[in-house]
Image (cartoon, coloured by chain):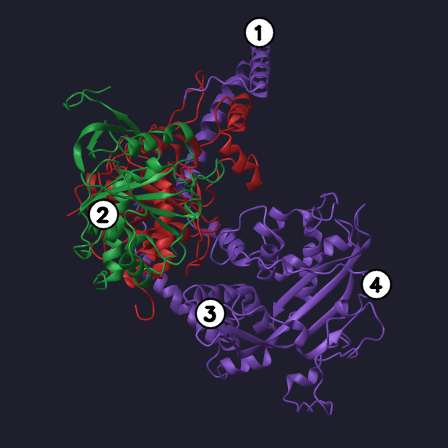
């Protein structure tokens, strides 16, 4: 695109983000502050993920963008079109064909492969934020590895509801040290973070933080001996592909409350139905 | 003689960065970046020169160990990256050194518990670098174990091994030898195993 | 039959076409031209330039036109453009004392060197709709002074023989740059002022107002408000010379507030400061009130009110950030909502089962003791963490 650098960001900004990414990978789960830039899309719409993608993306990369697991949701379409325009890269909807996958709220059902990079869009990177609103305080809590309040919060849920009432953005501990927000993925996806083959990068543009989970890294969802972590399960199967093991979206089909359940990962669903070339 | 830079700064540095990222994400794996060759008499090889071109700019104070320092290197860095060269090792963001330099007890920043990222990244020139040998690496980015031979470098490995005790504070290292590089971030556990390297059993 | 949502690309393209049509409005009306906006809606232009941190009236006017007059959208457009610009030079500190004054008033002194100059102000207009402006009416040219005004010294500096007013000192340190590095709380005053300068006017106005109503009251007086043109100078290393590269319009407000002082320092008035591009008087006054409120800790006052809490005030001041995050709620959240649905159904099922058993007194007792046990464990922080 005329007037803009390859992948939109100028080289100095990319270098700043790249240096921060190397530190993020070296300190798994730690939120590295970075000089986030304005992007030509609103804050909260994936500007953090986009800055990371723009900093790592090369001309030969194949890019996939998903939102809610789907390639065809409007924001995924818009971000994909942005990178086609500013970087001229090839894009795909096939998880296995992508080098870089930018995602909002899901990890693909198809297991990721070595060398792939998953870039998460993160709205609130601080897992302790809803317990302690002050950045100064939460920074201290991470420094001192003082995570008791998080367990108290989860246990209060159990006392009140009989369950831990966190269903997405479910906090994890990375390599036994940092309590980390996995972004608002459903807790269904948390096990995929553990010992993944792929590198996972997290970008929060408005909050100007980035962090990483390297491949083959221990990632444990916080829980208690008497209330072990468990993921969502459905009685239904996907109405399109019949999957009994993927995350399902509920779709209202008429005005009398009929509904059906379908895979949220559209590429995975199509693949199972044999509809992908 | 002026040192060569990337032919295509945007795309060459992107490719090299991805190799650095890959190296850092999978400690102990060798990467062979495509980088311009510094002049023959230079004290550093293409992998290290490429890393400098990729990472350094006006915002990154660089410290250079005396055994690698030369007017030609300084001029090349100033011209191609503009990075300020500092004598104050504790204020440096990157340090250019050999495996012997660390024995001299130089003061580098390892960050604080609140900001562990405000710490040095060591860029090390080695005579020898093989992906098998007495040094065993494990931790994030390593499925089981990886091994390295970096020649005579007990002091360097001892220093990087000490990272675990100060974690999350620490120093991250990119080790290079001619056209190869490997990374050992602070998250890596470094141990010496003097036995012959054999296929590892699961722990 | 269910059909997966497809065609997002076409929908987006169509929405953009419709938007362009609505922006243009009725085609039998003349299209707004950017010069008209820059010339006749200049207070909008000035606000957009201020909150976007980019002084360019033409591009700010273009942003306003493109945004159909939505100020925050225009700020966003200009900000996103600004971020792509190279940094060619850093100016010398601006000297507002040498401002070519267009307006300058003080509420603390009746007569001041250089005089009170009302300038172009809405202050004493009667807010009666001027129906003549419905038609095209000629506007008379303004009366002008014979001679240009002399540079007016800052009142607060001038009238400080007695040391009654706190003096600002330059400690020579390089200010932090919030456009390059993220703010790192707690932040110093220079950083705070940068964040306030690009902060949303309405937000600062509300916070400033809250201090006047008692939430962190600090008894302000408008020491001086000035508006005019200031030179921008840069130091050229090659020539070792400072050269003027142009001028910009600025609004500045110096607020005088109630005393500070300690065992060591005699009591004196304290200050709050506001500065903005263009004619942005309301913004600079609000900014000065909030600046002063945020100095509470430094001045030994207790921090009790919202406007005094730096992290709260500063982290929420930027309207590009806040409008982005509020508007992101429009994006699909199917997955998270589905996760909540699944949990809610499970909880309701459990609740139902429990209610149907609730008649059994033995069960009731167990419920109570289970809950008490859980609460006790949580409060003691005793957890069988599995990590």
Distance from Cα at disc 1 to Cα at disc 3: 79 Å
For mark 1, what is the residue? Answer: C362
> Residue at label 4?
C162
The chain painted red is A
Any part of residue C315 in sight? yes
Find out whether the residues at labels 1 and 2 contact each other: C-beta distance under 8 Å.
no
Kindly identify which chain the residue marked by label 2 belongs to: A
Q: Is residue A154 above or below residue C215?
A: above
CA separation, marks 3 and 2?
41 Å
> Considering the numbered disc 3 on the image, is that residue within a helix, a strand or a loop?
loop
Furthest residue toward right: C110
Q: Residues within 10 Å of mark 1 (few under 14, many from 20)?
A: few
Q: Nearer the viewer, residue B118 or C376?
A: B118
Left or right of C271, for residue A239: left
SS at badge 2: loop
Q: Which residue is mark 3?
A: C89
Q: Identify the image quadrant of the C terminus of chain B.
A: top left
Residue at horizontal 48 percent and vertical 53 percent from the top: C181
């Amino acid at each position: 695109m005329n007037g803009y650098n390859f992948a939109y960001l100028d080289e100095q900004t990319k270098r700043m983000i790249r240096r921060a990414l190397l530190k993020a990978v070296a300190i798994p789960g730690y939120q590295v502050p970075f000089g986030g830039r304005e992007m030509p899309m609103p804050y909260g719409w994936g500007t953090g993920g986009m800055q990371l993608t723009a900093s790592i993306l090369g001309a030969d990369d194949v890019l996939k963008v998903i939102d809610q697991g789907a390639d065809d949701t409007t924001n995924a379409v818009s971000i994909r079109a942005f990178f086609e325009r500013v970087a001229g890269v090839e894009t795909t909807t096939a998880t296995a064909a992508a080098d870089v996958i930018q995602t909002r709220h899901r990890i693909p059902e198809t297991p990721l492969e070595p060398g792939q990079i998953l870039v998460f869009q993160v709205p609130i990177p601080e897992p302790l934020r809803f317990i302690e609103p002050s950045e100064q305080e939460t920074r201290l809590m991470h420094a001192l590895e003082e995570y008791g309040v998080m367990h108290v919060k989860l246990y209060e849920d159990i006392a009140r509801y009989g369950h831990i009432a966190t269903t997405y953005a479910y906090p994890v501990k990375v390599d036994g040290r940092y309590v980390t927000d996995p972004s608002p993925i459903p807790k269904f996806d948390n096990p995929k973070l553990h010992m993944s083959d792929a590198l996972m990068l997290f970008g929060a543009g408005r909050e100007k933080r980035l962090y990483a989970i390297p491949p083959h890294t221990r990632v444990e969802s916080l829980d208690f001996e008497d209330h072990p972590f468990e993921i969502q399960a459905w009685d239904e199967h996907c109405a399109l592909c019949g999957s009994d093991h993927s995350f399902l979206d509920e779709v209202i089909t008429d005005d009398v409350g009929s509904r059906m359940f379908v895979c949220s990962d559209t590429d995975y669903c199509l693949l199972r139905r044999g509809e992908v070339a | 003689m002026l040192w060569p830079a990337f032919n295509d700064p945007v795309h060459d540095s992107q490719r090299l960065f991805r190799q650095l990222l890959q190296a850092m994400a999978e400690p102990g794996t060798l990467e062979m970046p495509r980088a311009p060759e510094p002049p023959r008499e230079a004290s550093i090889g293409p992998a290290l020169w490429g890393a400098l071109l990729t990472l350094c700019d006006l915002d990154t104070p660089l410290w250079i160990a005396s055994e690698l320092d030369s007017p030609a290197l300084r001029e090349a860095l100033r011209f191609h990256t503009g990075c300020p060269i500092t004598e104050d090792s504790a204020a440096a963001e990157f340090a250019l050194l050999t495996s012997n330099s660390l024995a001299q007890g130089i003061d580098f920043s390892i960050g604080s518990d609140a900001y562990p990222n405000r710490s040095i990244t060591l860029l090390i020139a080695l005579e020898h670098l093989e992906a098998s040998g007495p040094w065993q690496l494990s931790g994030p980015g390593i499925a089981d174990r990886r091994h390295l031979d970096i020649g005579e470098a007990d002091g360097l490995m001892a220093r990087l091994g000490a990272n675990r005790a100060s974690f999350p504070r620490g120093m991250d290292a990119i080790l290079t030898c001619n056209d190869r590089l490997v990374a050992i971030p602070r998250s890596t556990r470094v141990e010496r195993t003097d036995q012959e390297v054999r296929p590892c059993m699961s722990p | 039959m269910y059909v997966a949502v497809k065609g997002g690309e076409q929908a987006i393209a169509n929405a953009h076409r419709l938007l362009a049509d609505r922006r243009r409005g009725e085609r039998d009306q003349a299209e707004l031209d950017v010069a008209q906006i820059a010339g006749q809606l200049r207070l909008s232009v000035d606000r957009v330039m201020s909150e976007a941190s980019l002084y360019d009236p033409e591009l700010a006017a273009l942003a306003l036109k493109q945004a159909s007059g939505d100020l925050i959208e225009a700020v966003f457009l200009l900000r996103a453009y600004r971020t792509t610009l190279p940094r060619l030079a850093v100016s010398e500190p601006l000297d507002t004392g040498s401002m070519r004054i267009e307006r300058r008033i003080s509420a603390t002194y009746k007569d001041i060197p250089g005089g009170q100059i009302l300038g172009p102000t809405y202050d004493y207009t009667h807010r009666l709709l001027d129906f003549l402006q419905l038609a095209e009416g000629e506007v008379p040219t303004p009366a002008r002074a014979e001679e240009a005004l002399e540079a007016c010294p800052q009142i607060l500096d001038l009238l400080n023989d007695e040391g009654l007013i706190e003096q600002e000192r330059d400690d020579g340190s390089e200010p932090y740059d919030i456009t390059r590095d993220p703010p790192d709380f707690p932040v110093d005053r220079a950083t705070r002022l940068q964040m306030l300068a690009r902060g949303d006017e309405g937000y600062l106005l509300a916070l400033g107002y809250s201090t006047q109503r008692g939430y962190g009251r600090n008894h302000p007086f408008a020491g001086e408000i000035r508006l005019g043109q200031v030179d921008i100078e840069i130091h050229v290393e090659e020539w070792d010379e400072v050269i003027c590269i142009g001028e910009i319009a600025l609004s500045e407000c110096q607020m005088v507030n109630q005393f500070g002082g300690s065992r060591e320092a005699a009591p004196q008035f304290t200050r709050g400061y506001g500065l903005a591009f263009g004619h942005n008087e309301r913004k600079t006054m609000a900014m000065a009130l909030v600046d002063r409120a945020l100095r509470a800790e430094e001045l030994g006052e207790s921090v009790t009110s919202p406007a005094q809490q730096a992290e709260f005030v500063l982290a929420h001041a930027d309207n590009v950030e806040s409008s982005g995050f509020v508007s992101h709620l429009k994006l699909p959240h199917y997955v998270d909502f589905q996760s909540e649905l699944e949990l809610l159904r499970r909880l309701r099922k459990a609740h139902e089962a429990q209610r149907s058993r609730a008649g059994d007194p033995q069960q009731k007792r167990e419920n109570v003791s289970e809950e008490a046990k859980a609460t006790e464990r949580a409060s003691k922080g005793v957890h069988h963490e599995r990590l």
